[in-house]
Image (cartoon, grey):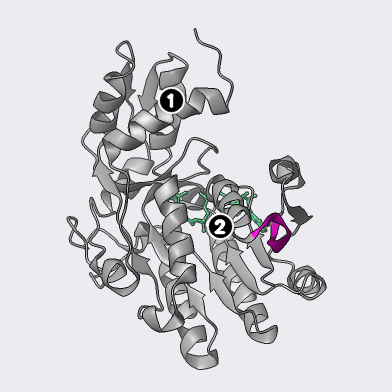
Amino acid sequence: MEKILVIGAGGQLGTELTKALANKYGSDAVIASDFQESVRSKFEYCSFRTLNVMDREAAATLIKEEQITQIYHLAAILSASGEKNPIQAWDLNMGGLLSVLELSKEHNIKKIFWPSSIAVFGPDTPKVNTTQDAFKNPTTVYGISKLAGEHWCEYYFNKYGVDVRSLRYPGLIGYKSMAGGGTTDYAVDIFHKAVNQENFSCFLQEDTYLPMMYMEDAVNATIQLMEAPAAAIKIRTSYNISGMSFSPKEIYDCIKMHVPNFKISYAPDFRQQIADSWPKSIDDTAAKLDWGWKANYDLTKMTGEILTKLPVYFNYQKK
Ligand code: NAD
Ligand code: SER
């Protein structure tokens, strides 16, 4: 039987991915873990263990005790928070990954998933339909750590046969969890303001296009990649995947079709410079060819679904 450990399960992605894994493989097959004990209540449907990924001994004990066969390692400090605490971001993003790779080698873990990001690209990368192998000169500590991490994954695969797989997620947008310290967070926050009939102040300029993806597509892509036969995974750094591309003005206009009184203003801050260094849209031909990836959601479909489901999920009262 598979035993899947999700590290950093309490965050924006883990909240939804862990549930999808439990639905697919059964609750007994999934162990959620996070260093924040406070997120335990999200995981009533499966086991939860408190784990700091930097505590290698504790992670090794958990892997042995629970006879873990697969690891999804999600714990990281994202782009905007990383710029405030660069050394801490490097320590967690690199130290956590190296620890998971080393433990996977030692304990013969069958498969590992580790997310990379569009942040591996930089200001000199071609911005439109950015290709898999486009030039990369990341300028954030987050992007530098993801680019180095991709190469460590490839190294462990080539040198030790560790079956580690990875996706370069665009900005992820879901309605079941809040975003945690990234540059694309505005595209999650905007929905909460809209359904609560509050004005929204956006920290990016209105014409800042970024690659984005609905959470359901991201979760499906992840499980599809992990289910694919090993021989189909030809890229062992990380795959580009694409969902949609829009600017703050475009998502605002789309929401306004459903919430006509919704108001937005723009107050760009330090995150503008990060956004300006990233691609506007992504080419994901390799993911399509190698393991059959295809996104299901565009901006219109995602917006309609979030505006319907978010108020019910958070039990927001109509104003
Ligand atoms: P998040 O910040 O919402 O969640 C991270 C989780 O990791 C949190 O629950 C946190 O408590 C936990 N964590 C932090 N330090 C830890 C430690 N030392 N030990 C164990 N747990 C720890 O992040 P997210 O948005 O869910 O992102 C998950 C992964 O996906 C990250 O690797 C991120 O880089 C990647 N990613 C996310 C996006 C996005 O838009 N959300 C885009 C690209 C890549
Ligand atoms: N959404 C992430 C961020 O903004 C990109 O990896 O940091």
Give the mark, 2 or 1, whose residue is nearer the N terminus.
2
Question: Taking 53 as reference, is 126 left or right?
Answer: left
**Residue under circle 2?**
76
Is residue 31 part of the magenta span, yes or no? Answer: yes
Question: Which of the 4 image quarters holds residue 105?
Answer: bottom right
Q: Is mark 2 within 8 Å of ligand 1?
A: yes
Tell whether 100 sits left or right of 228: right
Q: Check disc 2 and report its element: helix, strand or loop.
A: loop
Label 1 secondary element: helix
Q: Residue at x 62, y 71 (%)?
A: 70
Look at the image and say whether residue 15 sits in the magenta stretch. Answer: no
In the depicted structure, whether residue 161 falls above or below residue 269: below
| Mark 2 crowdedness (10 Å alpha carbons): few <14, some 14-19, many ≥20 | many
Which labelled disc corresponds to residue 308?
A: 1
Q: Residue 82 location, x and y as percent?
A: 50, 53
Q: Which residues are magenta?
A: 26-32
- Residue 146 appears in which quarter of the rendering? bottom left
Q: Nearer the viewer, mark 2 or mark 1?
A: 1
The 10 Å Cα crowd at callout 1, few under 14, some 14 to 19, many 20 or more, is few
In which quadrant will I find the N terminus?
A: bottom right
C-alpha span from label 2 to label 1: 30 Å
Q: Is residue 210 visible?
A: no
Q: Height in image: 132 above or below 319?
A: below
* Three-letter code for the amino acid on which mark 2 is drawn: Ala
Look at 74% across and 40% down and name the residue there.
Answer: 41
